[in-house]
């Protein structure tokens, strides 16, 4: 990462790394890690992969991609039965959330199949959904493929760092759903012959350590059960989005959000906002972030090849 050499400021790093295009989440959630690396001259590498690839796999499956579309990734090791059942509970949980989830729920469980520990905590999902039917469905198979693609990409990035320096201590900072029980990244690393892997996970101060499964992780560390909330500094439309050739595709709409109230639906293509043509997620995000409290934001949306005019009405404050 060039920033670890101390040559880039925050704005230059975010611009050159195409942060909004490739990730989009609030950079303030991550910048403390980047500052630590720069101050201590710790080299950093990007583990993630283009979200468009993960989204495509989630819609069509891994086997639908040709060699060039796979961005150099090798075939992921198949998920274990335990991992598939864990992902099936997550899948059922996500299906349950759709239509009545809060922003916080959907932030914790990413629309692109990033598994979350809260889904495992919802263990009664087995009673509420026919997990066996989910395990047999094609949609779920693609869901698993997307997760495995993500796991494999990060595992290969870690393996590449070890190839460059076999004596280095490589520390990966990733979502816990890619690590718990050794299902995700550790499983893929083992498939590549890398067995010396340790997993360190956080737990809340209120958690009962004695009740933790012994195979959850190599070790755990305690964090405050009620951390300070991250300040929301601007407007939120309430959608998961991705680039497409015809505009910005809506992948998911948060229930009760500004987008939902405006009538935006999954699959819609947003082509303009506030009179500005938007052809990428970063362009749409830039327009949204300029909106003041109480703003009415006109949108042109393409749905079923038919243009529609919509108005997104932002609240009078962003608290």
Image (cartoon, grey):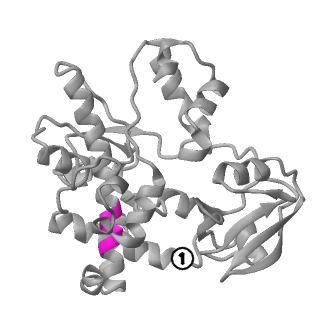
Where residue 309 appears, x then y in whole percent?
83, 75
Magenta part, dominant SS: helix
Can residue 236 be seen?
yes
Quadrant in which residue 11 is drawn: top right
Where residue 290 appears, x then y in whole percent?
82, 47
97, 286: nearer the viewer: 286
**Region rendered in magenta:** 141-146
In the picture of the structure, the residue carrying the numbered disc 1 is 98
Which residue shows up at 80% across the image and 70% down it? 300
Can residue 25 be seen?
no
Bin the neighbour count of mark 1 within 10 Å (Cα to Cα): few under 14, some 14-19, many 20 and up.
some
Horizontally, is 191 left or right of 252 in the view? Answer: left
Horizontally, is 150 left or right of 214 in the view? Answer: right
Quadrant in which residue 127 is drawn: bottom left
122, 247: nearer the viewer: 247
When the figure is inspected, residue 121 is found, relative to residue 139, above or below; the finding is above
Which residue shows up at 39% across the image and 20% down it? 43
Which residue shows up at 56% across the image and 13% down it? 7
Q: Assign the N terminus to one quadrant of the image.
A: top left
Report the label total: 1
């Amino acid at each position: 990462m060039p920033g670890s050499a101390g040559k880039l400021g925050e704005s230059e790093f975010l611009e050159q790394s195409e942060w909004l295009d490739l990730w989009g989440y609030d950079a303030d959630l991550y910048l403390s890690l980047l500052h630590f690396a720069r101050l201590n001259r710790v080299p950093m590498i990007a583990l993630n992969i283009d979200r468009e690839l993960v989204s495509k796999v989630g819609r069509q499956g891994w086997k639908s991609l040709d060699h060039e579309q796979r961005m150099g990734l090798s075939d992921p090791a198949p998920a274990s039965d335990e991992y598939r059942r864990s992902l099936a509970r997550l899948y059922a949980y996500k299906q349950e959330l759709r239509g009545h989830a809060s922003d916080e729920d959907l932030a914790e469980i990413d629309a692109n199949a990033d598994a979350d520990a809260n889904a495992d905590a919802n263990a009664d999902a087995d009673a509420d959904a026919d997990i066996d039917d989910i395990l047999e469905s094609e949609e779920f198979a693609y869901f698993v493929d997307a997760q495995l693609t993500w796991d494999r990409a990060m595992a290969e990035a870690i393996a590449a760092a070890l190839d460059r320096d076999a004596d280095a201590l490589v520390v990966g900072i990733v979502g816990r759903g890619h690590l718990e029980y050794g299902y995700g990244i550790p499983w893929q690393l083992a498939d590549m012959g890398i067995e010396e892997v340790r997993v360190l996970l956080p737990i809340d101060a209120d958690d009962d350590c004695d009740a933790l499964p012994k195979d959850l992780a190599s070790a755990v560390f305690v964090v405050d059960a009620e951390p300070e909330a991250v300040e929301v500094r601007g407007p939120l439309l309430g959608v998961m989005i991705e680039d497409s050739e015809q505009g910005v595709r809506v992948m998911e709409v948060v229930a009760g959000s500004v987008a939902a109230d405006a009538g935006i639906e999954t699959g819609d293509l947003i082509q303009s906002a506030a009179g500005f043509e938007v052809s990428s997620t970063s362009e749409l995000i830039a327009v949204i972030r300029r909106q003041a409290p109480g703003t009415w934001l006109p949108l042109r949306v393409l749905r079923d090849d038919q243009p529609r005019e919509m108005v997104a009405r932002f609240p009078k404050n962003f608290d």
